Image (tube, rainbow, N blue to C red):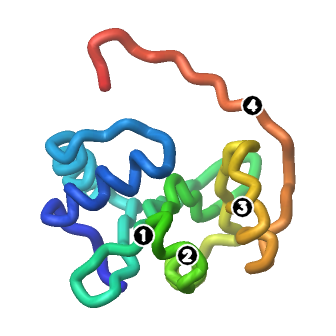
């Protein structure tokens, strides 16, 4: 387990595509650098030797309605490495970080079609706490 670097961009882009979001390696470099340069954000990966098996991006969120929480923005494990324990390692690291940061909970969203991911989260102790819709508006000129 280690923090991601911009040197991981090619594999991060590949994993992000597996998660269902288009990302070119050049843009992954920019995004990784931005995340790592933003206070409260962390991005780390599970590795087998030098091979990135999966990554997790999270951040500490201070909210009026839920207090201080750790928000998992993205978690993905390579299709070929699912079931290897990499996802469990990444979530354990997030839970450790949440305790260190004084968070009272960890939250994440998972698309309704990702039933395998839902089963994984439930196996490691997470509960479905709401049914929500994510609303998005693209801002012209921004990526």
Sequence-wise first label, 3 or 4 = 3
Which residue is more in the foreground, 73 or 59?
73
Q: Is residue 131 visible?
A: yes
Q: Check if mark 1's residue and mark 2's residue have beta carbons within 8 Å.
A: yes
Q: In which quarter of the image is the N terminus?
A: bottom left
Residue 137 x %, y %: 52, 16
Question: Which-is-in-front pick, marks 3 and 4?
Answer: 3
Q: Name the residue under label 2.
A: 87
Q: Position of residue 61 (x, y in %)?
A: 55, 55
In space, the residues marked 3 and 1 are separated at their CA atoms by: 16 Å
Q: Are marks 4 and 1 in contact (CB under 8 Å)?
A: no
Mark 3 or mark 2, whichever is nearer to me: 3
Q: Residue at x 58, y 64 (%)?
A: 70
| Residue corresponding to mark 1 | 54
Task: Please say if the residues under marks 3 and 4 sit with CB atoms less than 8 Å apart.
Answer: no
Q: Mark 4 or mark 1, which has the lower sequence index?
A: 1
Check residue 98 in the rendering and tell me which mark sits there, or answer none. Answer: none
Q: Circle 4 sits on which residue? A: 133
Q: List the single residue furthest toward the top.
A: 140
Q: Is mark 2 on a helix, strand or loop?
A: helix
Q: Distance between the residues labelled 2 and 4?
A: 25 Å
Residue at the image position 64 percent from the left and 49 percent from the top? 63
Rounded to the nearest whole Å, what is the CA distance between mark 1 and mark 2?
Answer: 7 Å
Q: What residue would you read off at disc 3?
A: 116
Q: Residues within 10 Å of mark 4 (few under 14, many from 20)?
A: few
Asked if disc 3 and disc 1 are in contact, CB closer than 8 Å, the reply is no
Q: Residue furthest front?
A: 80
Q: In which quarter of the image is residue 53?
A: bottom left
Quadrant of the drawing holding the C terminus: top left
**Which is more foreground, mark 3 or mark 1?**
3
Please tell me which of labels 3 and 1 falls first in the chain.
1
């Amino acid at each position: 387990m280690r923090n991601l670097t911009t040197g991981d961009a090619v594999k991060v882009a590949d994993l992000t595509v597996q998660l269902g979001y288009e990302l070119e390696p050049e843009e992954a470099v920019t995004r990784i650098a931005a995340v790592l340069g933003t206070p409260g954000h962390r991005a780390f990966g599970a590795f087998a030797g030098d091979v990135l098996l999966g990554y997790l991006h999270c951040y500490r969120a201070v909210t009026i309605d839920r207090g201080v929480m750790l928000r998992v923005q993205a978690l993905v494990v390579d299709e070929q490495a699912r079931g290897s324990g990499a996802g469990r390692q990444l979530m354990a690291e997030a839970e450790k970080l949440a305790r260190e940061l004084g968070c009272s909970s960890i939250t994440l969203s998972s698309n309704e079609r990702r039933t395998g991911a839902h089963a994984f989260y439930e196996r490691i102790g997470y509960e479905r706490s709401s049914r929500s819709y994510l609303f998005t508006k693209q801002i012209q000129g921004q990526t």
